[in-house]
Image (cartoon, grey):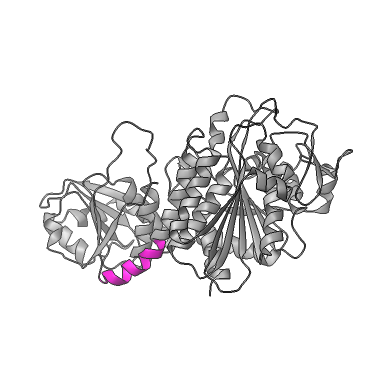
Amino acid sequence: MTTPIPLFFDEVNLDAIATQTGRIVVFLEPNGRFDRSSRRINRLTKGALGRFVASEAFEEMNEGSGMDLAYPAGMAASAVQVIRLPRSPSVEAARKAGATIAKSLTKEGAMVCANTIGKAAEISFGIALRAYDFNPHKTSDPKEIGEVRFQVSRPEDVAAKAAPLASIAEGVFFTRDLVNEPSNVLTTDDFAARLAAMQELGLEVEILDEEALEELGMGALLAVGQGSESPSKVVVMQWNGGGDEPPLALVGKGVVFDTGGISIKPAAGMEDMTMDMGGAGVVSGVMRSLALRRAKANVVGLVGIVENMPDGKAMRPGDVVKSMKGDTIEVLNTDAEGRLVLCDVMWYAQERFKPAAMVDLATLTGAIIIGLGHDNAGVFSNNDKFCNRFLKAAQAEGEGAWRMPLGASYDKLLKSPVADMKNIGGRPAGSITAAQFLQRFVKKETPWIHLDIAGVAHIKSGTDFAPGGATGWGVLALNRLIQDRFEG
């Protein structure tokens, strides 16, 4: 898998600035005040840094943004990158500063002079997140990034703060790799094997095959994959770090490729459906992060892994399937398959683990993109307190999330003349009726959140902290929710 670039933390050594090759990064407060490193750079460059601070260009810079002074006289460096940042920045500004640094990194590497910055670990986290590059299928040489070393006043303290953030970054990278992989590589078998390999980290991993799923009665999930040569699976990952407390259950939709089935999608854009396992990817990344940082919480991650293909054996519009719960579902559109996968896995999670709360994630509806674009995931919940905790965690981590409504009035759109319910409710309120469908498989005593991440899981233009492609959205927010609500 893609791993975050290594970052090192050293004692401040002002004499090394003059001879450092490659890039040097220095931080300047909005008022232009110099610290020891910037004073040394200004002296070496015969006042060039001071002239830049007095310029209109510096005044117009935003917090966390940067500008290069190329090939500075009096120094061996190829560039001095000036980052505008307060001495005590917000977490968001510090991470954005790190992302700014990462975008400019080359094989020359960089020295980051952060001796007076209060959130150097968060800057390193921003670097790690933005320096991601998915390249296993390129035959040309991948982009090489040289060594990045921080100069800080207390390197041991900063390294200790950076270590758990590095574990989270690895979880984000694991999610991004899964979502970016082409579907001929990330088959249902390959996906399950990658999750099984995380037993080496201390996770308990169990793979339920089609025979086991049939015995459990997961007729809705199995119907989705019956047209594919790739066998359907459910993978259960347990992290038991919190004593005897009931776990938080995370449930993810893992459709490794979605043609739409018999209700086939248009050809234009179908290649993007390699990302339709994004919910399962996020669950997998969270579980990896928890294991790496040895979280003091009980969390179980369950992913339903299927492929939705057209075939002589494929599920047809008009079919009636039976869920594990026992409810029957009239399938009007085989392209509304994610909810059929989730409903069985959600019911199984509650029956087996009696979770303290449950969160499901899925690239579920195009309607949520129409409503919220690519800035926010849709959040649906049956529990205000639990939902507000998640929204607070998402806001703290800078991951956009917006609460959407649920209500009994939407149920009439799901009424079927031949079964207990339909799998779609028509065009009006498409994301809401999908969530309303899922809520039928949530027990009354279970606090539950449904996250429709169709608009945020994969973005072609990229984000502040990820290049174009998979974002890893949700790993940070769910990790924060677990830290704040389920640890300690």
Residue located 56% across and 74% down the image? 243
Percent of width and height locating residue 404: 69, 52
Q: Is residue 48 left or right of residue 475?
A: left
Q: Is residue 98 left or right of residue 52?
A: right
User: What's the magenta bit mostly, secondary-structure-wise?
Assistant: helix
Percent of width and height locating residue 392: 58, 63
| In the foreground, 175 or 107 | 175
Percent of width and height locating residue 102: 33, 49
Residue 221 drawn above or below residue 248: above
Residue 7 drawn above or below residue 460: below
Residue 256 drawn above or below residue 385: above
Q: Is residue 56 magenta?
A: no
Q: Is residue 472 visible?
A: no
Residue 259 drawn above or below residue 10: above
The quarter holding residue 161 reads bottom left
Q: Is residue 145 visible?
A: yes
Q: Is residue 157 magenta?
A: yes
Percent of width and height locating residue 472: 49, 49
Residue located 44% across and 40% down the image? 468
- Span colored in magenta: 153-165
Q: Is residue 145 left or right of residue 396?
A: left
| In the foreground, 324 or 117 | 324
